[in-house]
Amino acid sequence: MARLEFSLPRVWRAVAKGLKRALVLLLVGLIRIYQLVISPLLGPRCRFWPSCSSYTIEALQVHGPFKGGWMAIRRIIKCHPGNPGGMDPVPGGRSEELCSEELRREDNCTDNHQETTDKKAP
């Protein structure tokens, strides 16, 4: 009987993990439908890269339905005519890696900040 008591929390964690995964799949599916059906009718409107729908999918996949969902809501609220937009990658996601690579390529960001500030003029 004691063995059952110790395994029960593990079962509940597995069930919770499965439910979170199912919720992410459902939400991502709904967003994909939006991307395929509604978004082409509206045309490109997002001021950010990645687009709000792509950001939401990535946030859900990287951070889960609750934290990722909250990040998506905050992002969608920011996407309005008064905001200039720009690069806004998902923290910890692939878009953040791509953004960092792009900045390095454009030489807007270097990895040797410390070296350049420590060098003294001759």
Image (tube, helix red, strand yellow):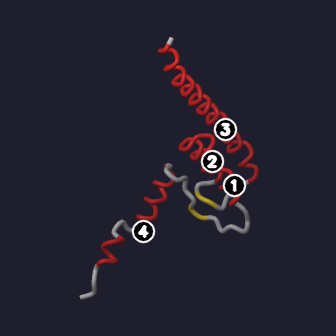
Q: Which residue is mark 4?
A: 109
Q: Which residue is mark 2?
A: 56
Residue 35 coordinates in the image, percent (x, y): 68, 45
Q: Residue at x 49, y 50 (%)?
A: 92
The residues tagged by marks 3 and 4 sit, at their Cα atoms, a distance apart of 35 Å
**Label 2 secondary element:** helix
Disc number for residue 93: none
Q: Which residue is mark 1?
A: 76
What amino acid type should be assigned to the residue bearing mark 1?
Ile
Mark 4 nearby-residue class (10 Å; few <14, some 14–19, many ≥20): few
Residue 47 coordinates in the image, percent (x, y): 66, 62
Q: Residue at x 51, y 11 (%)?
A: 1
Q: Are marks 3 and 2 in contact (CB under 8 Å)?
A: yes
Q: Is 57 in front, or is 42?
A: 57
**Label 3 secondary element:** helix
Q: Are marks 1 and 4 in contact (CB under 8 Å)?
A: no
Question: Which of the image's four quarters has the C terminus?
Answer: bottom left
Q: Are marks 1 and 2 in contact (CB under 8 Å)?
A: yes
Q: Which residue is mark 3?
A: 27
Residue 79 lies in quadrant? bottom right
Q: Residue furthest left?
A: 122
Of the two numbered discs 3 and 4 on the same chain, state the one appearing first in sequence.
Answer: 3
Of the two numbered discs 4 and 2 on the same chain, state the one appearing first in sequence.
Answer: 2
